[in-house]
């Protein structure tokens, strides 16, 4: 008879569940893994069931030893207690006038001594703890279960018909054989105890009428011992497996918690967790920095109402907790600090449920606050706009090159003809502006994202700076000599730096052009210096005696498209900074005192590196 589709689907699902079960060293006797029914323990309450599982997992992982180790220690203590109880029973029987066998008393005393020694003496500790070695496991079985079988079997056989019934003691070795050893050994132990029970019954004679009842009782007891051996083995395997799973799950949870904590600690945005009493339970360093004008606020926990400057934030949190509503984009609020400028923050709120402190059974609402400095957000947005503008500018500059080349060529052809003074002057103006546009296009293309970058090479900074200064002076028609506006101070020995020669020349030309534009006509009004700052760094200083840069302008001189001239593109110093950073160098500006002639100094700090043996400094003719 064919099964129905529903029965087939149920069978396939059960088969799939069995296949999905992870393999273990010793599978279940019944052919499948036991399943946990949450309805048994939590009556369908999933949250309560999860809480109980979490508590059990914490208790398992928090303990120093495994559950099997605790069972072994308990077994050792029970054996010692049984030994003392047997000796006490023999002594009490003797005091009460009962007939006590001397051999049985000696067996009880010997068993008590052996059990107490295994329990208390450290040298026997491997025999009372879980072991993985098969040899130690056999020794452990012989020292505990084997001794129990011999001792309790001797008491059962020798004490049959006496005042004390020792047969119940045989359950203990069968139970522990299922816990400690493989299934085959546990079943063999149960079989041996069943034979002992039958042997004890048959000692009285072979009268069928008298033996029928005791043999039936012994057979049922032996069957029960087999069941005990099987169940104890199943429970021990299940206990070890679930304890291992609990330890693994809790370890994964601990690793995830550490990862989350690390991510939150390194976040740029501030994160605060505030409860219903406006107390901060957790705060990352970014949030603690945003709550004070300098440094970090105290670590959590602390109250939002403890400082006057936090009152706007406390009111906003109280409002959010009361209304349980907050805009997705957040709201802005301002924190005022004594002696410093106020700080505007963008506040985003998320609502969660948490445990009330001191009461694990009561929930309370929590606010997760995401704080962001509006100034930093605006600066980040500005950087993104600049990056997008740079990509667009690079594309436009690329398209401008072809028509610009055509204009330059046509203007050059016009200059070859006989022109009047007015027309020639106009052609010169066109040529000058074409050259200016070419320089701007080259600057933009140089900084285009994804463009080719020349790798740094070891070069002699002394020779490169000297050649670049001489070429620049010749280009701008600046005479060199004692009374020249340009004074070049170079070291006698070569200095090796890591840079690209053409880019280093470009940085120097930009800095010298700026200095010439603002310097006076006095001798040495422009000063170029090169020297070794340390074993790892070298510096180039370009100074001029022009008016010092205004303090309100100084923070923006290296920004793109910022210029104090109406005809300036604002890319010269920005290109210098980008080129320096490309090779691990740095550039900065410093303003000198008024009594020093060269008040404006631009400093380029480069990485030093050894020069190839073939390099030698080039002579510079003053």
Image (tube, grey):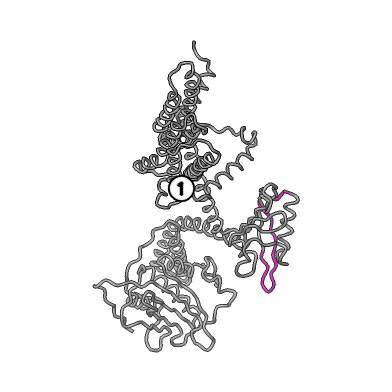
Residue 291 horizontal side relative to residue 147, left or right: right
> Height in image: 51 above or below 280?
above
Q: Nearer the viewer, residue 430 or 103?
A: 103
Q: Give the image location of residue 420, x and y in percent.
A: 45, 71
Q: Quadrant of residue 134?
A: top left
Q: Nearer the viewer, residue 254 or 78?
A: 78
Residue 508 horizontal side relative to residue 356, left or right: left
Residue with the most extreme front position: 97
The residue at which mark 1 appears reads as 116
Residue 222 horizontal side relative to residue 45, left or right: left
Q: Give the image location of residue 332, x and y in percent.
A: 69, 58
Q: Give the image location of residue 167, x and y in percent.
A: 49, 31
Q: Residue, x 38% and y 78% (percent of image)? A: 534
- How many C-alpha atoms fall within 10 Å of the one at disc 1: few (<14), some, or many (≥20)? some
The magenta segment: 324-343
Q: Residue, x 48% and y 18% (percent of image)? A: 212
Can you see residue 177? yes
**In which quadrant of the rendered image does the C terminus lie?**
bottom left
Does the magenta run of residues contain 332?
A: yes
> Height in image: 372 above or below 25?
below
> Height in image: 585 above or below 55?
below
Q: Give the image location of residue 218, x and y in percent.
A: 48, 24
Residue 356 horizontal side relative to residue 129, left or right: right
Q: Secondary structure at mark 1?
A: helix
Q: Residue, x 57% and y 73% (percent of image)? A: 553
């Amino acid at each position: 008879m064919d099964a129905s589709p529903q029965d087939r689907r149920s069978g396939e699902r059960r088969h799939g569940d069995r296949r999905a079960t992870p393999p273990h060293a010793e599978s279940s006797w019944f052919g499948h893994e036991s399943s946990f029914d949450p309805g048994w323990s939590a009556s369908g309450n999933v949250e309560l069931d999860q809480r109980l599982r979490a508590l059990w997992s914490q208790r398992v992982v928090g303990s120093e030893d495994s559950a099997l180790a605790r069972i072994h220690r308990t077994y050792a203590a029970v054996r010692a207690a049984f030994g003392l109880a047997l000796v006490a029973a023999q002594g009490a029987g003797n005091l009460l006038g009962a007939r006590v066998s001397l051999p049985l008393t000696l067996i009880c005393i010997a068993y008590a001594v052996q059990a107490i020694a295994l329990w208390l003496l450290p040298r026997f500790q491997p025999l009372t703890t879980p072991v993985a070695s098969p040899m130690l496991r056999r020794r452990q079985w012989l020292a505990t279960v084997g001794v129990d079988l011999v001792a309790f079997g001797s008491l059962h056989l020798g004490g049959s018909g006496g005042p004390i019934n020792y047969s119940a003691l045989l359950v203990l070795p069968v139970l522990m054989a299922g816990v400690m050893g493989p299934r085959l050994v546990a079943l063999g132990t149960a079989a041996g105890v069943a034979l002992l029970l039958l042997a004890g019954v048959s000692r009285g004679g072979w009268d069928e009428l008298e033996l029928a009842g005791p043999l039936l009782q012994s057979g049922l007891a032996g069957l029960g011992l087999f069941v005990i051996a099987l169940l104890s083995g199943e429970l021990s395997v299940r206990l070890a497996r679930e304890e291992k799973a609990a330890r693994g799950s809790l370890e994964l949870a601990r690793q995830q918690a550490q990862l989350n904590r690390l991510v939150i600690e390194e976040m740029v945005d501030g994160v605060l967790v505030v409860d219903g009493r406006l107390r901060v339970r957790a705060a990352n360093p970014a949030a603690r920095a945003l709550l004070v004008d300098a440094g970090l606020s105290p670590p959590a926990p602390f109250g939002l109402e403890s400082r006057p400057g936090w009152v706007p934030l406390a009111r906003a949190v109280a409002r959010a907790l009361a209304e349980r509503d907050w805009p997705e984009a957040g709201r802005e609020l301002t924190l005022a600090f004594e002696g410093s400028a106020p700080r505007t923050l963008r506040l985003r709120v998320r609502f969660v449920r948490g445990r009330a402190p001191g009461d694990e059974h009561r929930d309370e609402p929590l606010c997760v606050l995401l704080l962001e400095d509006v100034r930093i957000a605006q600066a980040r947005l500005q950087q993104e706009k600049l990056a997008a503008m740079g990509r667009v500018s690079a594309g436009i500059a690329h398209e401008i090159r072809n028509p610009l080349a055509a204009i330059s060529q046509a203007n050059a052809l016009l200059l070859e003809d006989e022109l009047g003074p007015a027309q020639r002057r106009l052609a010169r103006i066109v040529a000058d502006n074409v050259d200016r546009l070419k320089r701007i296009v080259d600057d933009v293309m140089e900084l285009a994202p994804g463009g080719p970058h020349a790798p740094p090479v070891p070069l002699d900074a002394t020779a490169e700076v000297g050649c670049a200064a001489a070429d620049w002076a010749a280009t701008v028609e600046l005479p060199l000599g004692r009374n020249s506006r340009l004074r070049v101070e170079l070291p006698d020995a070569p200095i090796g730096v890591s840079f690209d020669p053409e880019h280093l020349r470009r940085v120097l030309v930009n800095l010298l052009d700026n200095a010439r534009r603002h310097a006076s006509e006095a001798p040495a009004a422009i000063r170029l210096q090169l020297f070794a700052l340390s074993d790892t760094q070298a510096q180039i200083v370009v100074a001029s005696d022009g008016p010092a840069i205004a303090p309100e302008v100084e923070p923006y001189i290296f920004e793109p498209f910022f210029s104090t001239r109406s005809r300036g593109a604002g890319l010269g110093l920005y290109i210098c900074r980008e080129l320096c950073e490309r090779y691990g160098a740095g550039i900065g500006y410093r303003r000198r005192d008024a009594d020093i002639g060269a008040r404006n100094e631009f400093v380029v700090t480069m990485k030093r590196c050894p020069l190839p043996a073939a390099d030698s400094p080039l002579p510079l003719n003053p």
